[in-house]
Amino acid sequence: MFPVRIRVALGVITALVIAVVSSVPALADGPWPNDPQGPVARSIADLYWIMFIAAVVVLAIVDGAIIYAGIKFRERPGHVAQQFHGHNMLELTWTIIPTIMVVSFSVLSWQKLDFINNSRGGDVGMVIQAEGSQWQWTFSYPQEERYKLLEGYLKISEELHIPVGMKVRIELSAKDVIHSFWVPSLGGKKDAVPGRATELWIQADKPGTYKGQCLEFCGDGHADMLITLVAHTPSDYAAWIPEAVKQANIPLDPNTKVGRELFLSLACAGCHTIKGTTAGGKIGPELTHLMSKKSIAGGVLSPVNEENLKRWIADPPAVKPGTLMPKLPLSQQQIDDIVLFLQTLK
């Protein structure tokens, strides 16, 4: 057998290896806690690492002591297993030290929470409304002239755009069930509760695209309720606004509005989903980004262009026998109007 000191050292090393292996998910390549890109996320990460290191030290001591005791005082030929009952100094030590740790972590957590929850203090540069619904986030930008549309103000689903270095307050609401807003690299998470106003703040240190997720199980589409947050430099953000307004105005244009309203009034809206509209059907394919697809009708029609869309809508069974999509009694003008609207779905 190895000397007792070597065995103790091996026990401690084993405990450390177990601790590291068990923390692989946390140490993986981003996005959190090893890749904070904003003051809120950095504040959370700092506390996380303090607690993680303390936990590893405690695990090493406890497991090391158990392994050492198990080896040194075990029953073996020529040695009777030793029993110990009560040790005032040890009991006092493992009561006082954990108490100090818990109190210290509580104080640190309170300080961090005070900073994290301070969504109205400091220099808030922008306020954005985020509404969670099954299953998407919709972001409403400030009612300022630069965000004004032909009807209302800029509202975008799934993607949130902010300028770098600006403190942004996110005011949360939920349309149906409880959702939870979370962009790991930029901040903590906060629930969006129906009938209750909640909020948090985020700030990005550098330009980039940051991924987020609804973190409250909200139904069978929960896993797909994603957030894409794009942080722009101030100049890029200033250039993005008019382009976003232009794109948002396309469905509101009189030329495409007719087709949009017609689509939503027909059975189409009961079978297909178009995020940002009342169309929420689950029977047919989602059409939110229709014009980005390479083909439609299960690959029968390619590319996705005006001509093929008109053929498909005019008589689906003729294009693809056996399809569940029926032939609707539409005039040529109605088909043209619907296709004009569908071509805005990019």
Image (cartoon, rainbow, N blue to C red):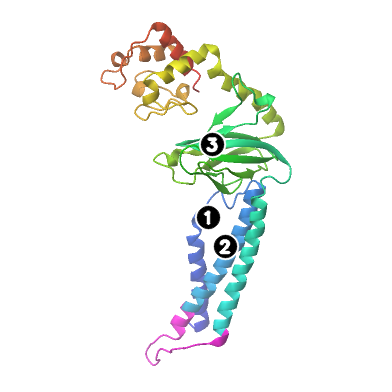
Which mark, residue 131? 3
| Residue 82 belongs to magenta span | yes
Label 3 sits on a secondary structure element that is strand
Q: CA distance from mark 1 to mark 2?
A: 10 Å
Which residue does the numbered mark 1 point to in the structure image? 26
Specify whether residue 328 is painted magenta.
no
Residue type at mark 1 is Ala
Under tag 2, what secondary structure? Answer: helix
Q: Main secondary structure of the magenta part?
A: loop
Q: Is residue 22 left or right of residue 76?
A: right
Q: Amino acid at mark 3?
A: Glu
Task: Tell me the quarter of the picture where residue 254 sits.
Answer: top right
Which residue bears the numbered disc 2? Answer: 52
Residue most extreme to the left: 322
Name the front one of labels 3 and 2. Answer: 3
Instruction: Examine the rendering and report whether any part of residue 201 can be seen.
Output: yes
Inter-mark Cα distance, 3 to 1: 29 Å
Q: Dividing the image into 4 quarters, which one contains the N terminus?
A: bottom left
Residue 156 x/y as whole percent: 56, 29
Mark nearer the N terminus (3 vs 1): 1
Residue sitting farthest toward the right: 123
The disc, 3 or 2, on the residue closer to the chain's N-terminal end is 2
Q: Is residue 296 above or below residue 205?
A: above
The residue that appears at 53% across and 38% down in the rendered structure is 227
Depth check: 139 or 56 in front?
139
Picture coordinates of residue 158, whole percent (x, y): 53, 34
The part of the chain drawn in magenta is 67-89
Answer yes or no: do the residues labelled 3 and 1 have beta carbons within 8 Å? no
